[in-house]
Image: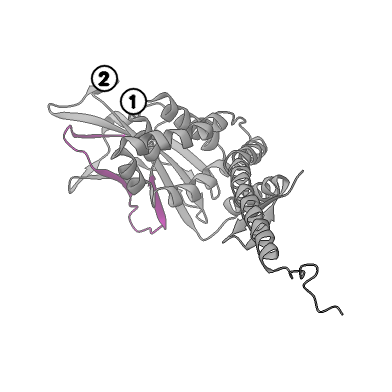
Amino acid sequence: MRTMPLAIHGRLGFSISAPKVVVLALVATLALCLFSLKVSAAEVWIAYSSKRQSQIGVWTAGSGKTFLIITATITVSGYSDFDTNPFYFTLQGDSTSYQHSIATYALPDHFKSEVVPDGSTRTGPLAFEIPQTAAVFALKYDRPFKSYNVRYSQRGRCLIATAAYQSELARQVEALRRVRDIHVMTTLAGSRFMQIFDRFYYSFSPQVAEIVSSNRLFVDTTRIVLDPLISILTLVSGETEIEVIASGIAISTMIGVTYFTIPFVGLDVLFRERRLRRKASRQTCRRIYSRDHRPRRPPRGSGSEP
């Protein structure tokens, strides 16, 4: 396959071929998978999403209140005694601490007092009865006489995609959530990957989402950038660890080809045209210079011949 040189400042340059881009994408994906599977310092990662509803089973929220159902995925690394007793969880919102509601026990697969083995993942819901006006909240875990290195991530909000498609219920946003919750978070490799990704993504996404939503041009541009990514991610499949890793490698390769190879080809065409124009200009200058400075022959009959 043809090498694509990229010019820098018109003189310095390096060359990258499409196969190299694919190989780099594969290497980066493998490194990320190995890193995500590596057991690092002891920690508990709690990623959670939420939804509101007025009734759970036979329980109805009081006047001016609603049930906030927290669905949490807990991944334990380095601890052998982490207990999911609902009494150890509280909801912090509007400077108030809320204990779990008895309606929790009407939820399917709700948390109960059980130990999550080291290296395992447990997913379950908790219900909290909160005022309808409560907008800011955070889940907290506090077990008496025990201390854990707990990290939290509030899932469920694809901030940049929501800003681009103007709704959390948009088809594209739902597709991203479906891939994450059904295929990625159900495996250990996927949940470890999401731990790393969430730390990175939520470090900048609120600011980016605010900028995107502030201008229609930014909204349209972000949609153009995200549409190929969403189409590729919907191809994710598999339920076992090996299937998810294999699918992740294939998807990463496709993303690398889409977002790196194609722009490199465009840059190559752009810089090639500039190089051709610069080369033609130099050749023209050489012709003009050689024409103006070539030695003149003396006219015949004007020499000093005897």
How crowded is the residue under tag 1: few (<14 C-alpha within 10 Å), some, or many (20+)? some
Decide if residue 93 is on the left or right side of residue 87.
left
Tell me which segment is drawn in magenta.
Answer: 127-153
Using residue 248 as the reference point, say whether residue 60 is left or right of it.
left
Q: What is the image's colouring?
A: one colour
242 vs 58: above or below: below
Task: Name the residue at 66% across, 53% down.
Answer: 280
Q: Residue at x 54, y 29 (%)?
A: 231
Residue at the extreme front: 306
- Asked whether the residues under the numbered discs 1 and 2 touch, taking CB atoms below 8 Å apart as contact, a structural biologist would say yes
Alpha carbon separation for disc pair 1 and 2: 8 Å
Q: Is residue 70 visible?
A: no
Q: Is residue 35 magenta?
A: no
Q: Which residue is mark 1?
A: 106
- Residue, disc 2: 58
198 or 164: nearer the eye? Answer: 164
Identify the amino acid type marked 1. Answer: Ala
Q: Give the quadrant of the N terminus.
A: top right
Query: Quadrant location of residue 147?
Result: bottom left
Quick one: label 2, few (<14), some, or many (20+) residues within 10 Å?
Answer: few
- Most extreme residue toward the top, as rendered? 58
Q: Was residue 138 drawn as part of the magenta stretch in this picture?
A: yes
Q: Residue at x 47, y 52 (%)?
A: 81
* 71 relative to 2, above or below: above
Residue type at tag 2: Val
